Image: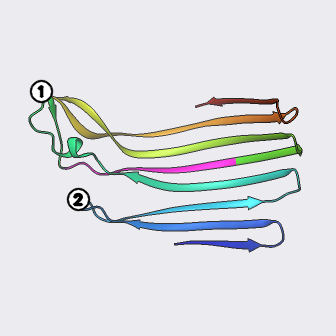
Amino acid sequence: MEGEWSIGGHLDLISGVRYDKHSDFEGIVNSGTVLIWCASNTVTPKFICDSAFRTPSLGELGLQNALGVLGNKNLAPETVDSYELVFNFRPQASLHTDFNLVFYRAKDLIELVPSWVGTQAEDARDQESYGFEGDANWSLNQHVRFNTNVSWQ
């Protein structure tokens, strides 16, 4: 289910929610929200927040006869919550730039960890990370265009 609302003349809110049911796990609700401010004809800041999950693979859950690797039927799905602040800047029709600040928090990351049989799939850890991305696109003419990007995490 998704909805879009205009809040005032220059502010838009897009929000959605999804219920996922997997045969081996309880249902989980994921959501996403984007707040867009059309500050001017050349500047558009956005705030984005999302949630997602990944179910364990068949091998991570039930691998039993592989040499040195054991599955784990007690694994939980990996989950992630992410937040992003985006600045879109278009000073002229031929120049387009984006700058993104990103943060995410992941829980129950599945990894193969040492065990008595060699390695076993486990909900081994949580992780937080942040970073930025930037890109610029400049069209000199219809035949020549320059693109560049940078990212750090």
The residue type indicated by label 1 comes to: Leu
Name the residue nearer the viewer: 86 or 90.
Answer: 90
Residue 48 in which image quadrant = bottom right
**Residue at the spot of label 2:** 24
Q: Position of residue 102 (x, y in %)?
A: 61, 42
Q: Position of residue 139 (x, y in %)?
A: 84, 35
The answer to whether residue 149 is magenta is no
Crowding around mark 1 (Cα neighbors within 10 Å: few <14, some 14 to 19, many 20+) is few
Name the residue nearer the viewer: 142 or 11.
Answer: 142
Q: How many marks?
A: 2
Residue at 32% x, 51% y: name it.
55
The answer to whether residue 77 is magenta is yes
- Start-end of magenta stretch: 74-85
The quadrant of the rendering that contains the C terminus is top right
Residue 126 in which image quadrant = top left
**Residue at the spot of label 1:** 67
Residue at 73% x, 35% y: name it.
135
View extreme (left): residue: 65
Is 65 left, or right, of 93 in this rendering? left
Is 68 left, or right, of 30 in this rendering? left
- The first of marks 1 and 2 along the sequence is 2
The residue type indicated by label 2 comes to: Asp
Element class at badge 1: loop
Is 37 left, or right, of 63 in this rendering? right
Secondary structure mostly seen in magenta is strand
Residue at 69% x, 42% y: name it.
100
Q: Position of residue 142 (x, y in %)?
A: 84, 36
Vertical comparison of 61 with 139: above or below:
below
Residue at 55% x, 67% y: name it.
16
Element class at badge 2: loop
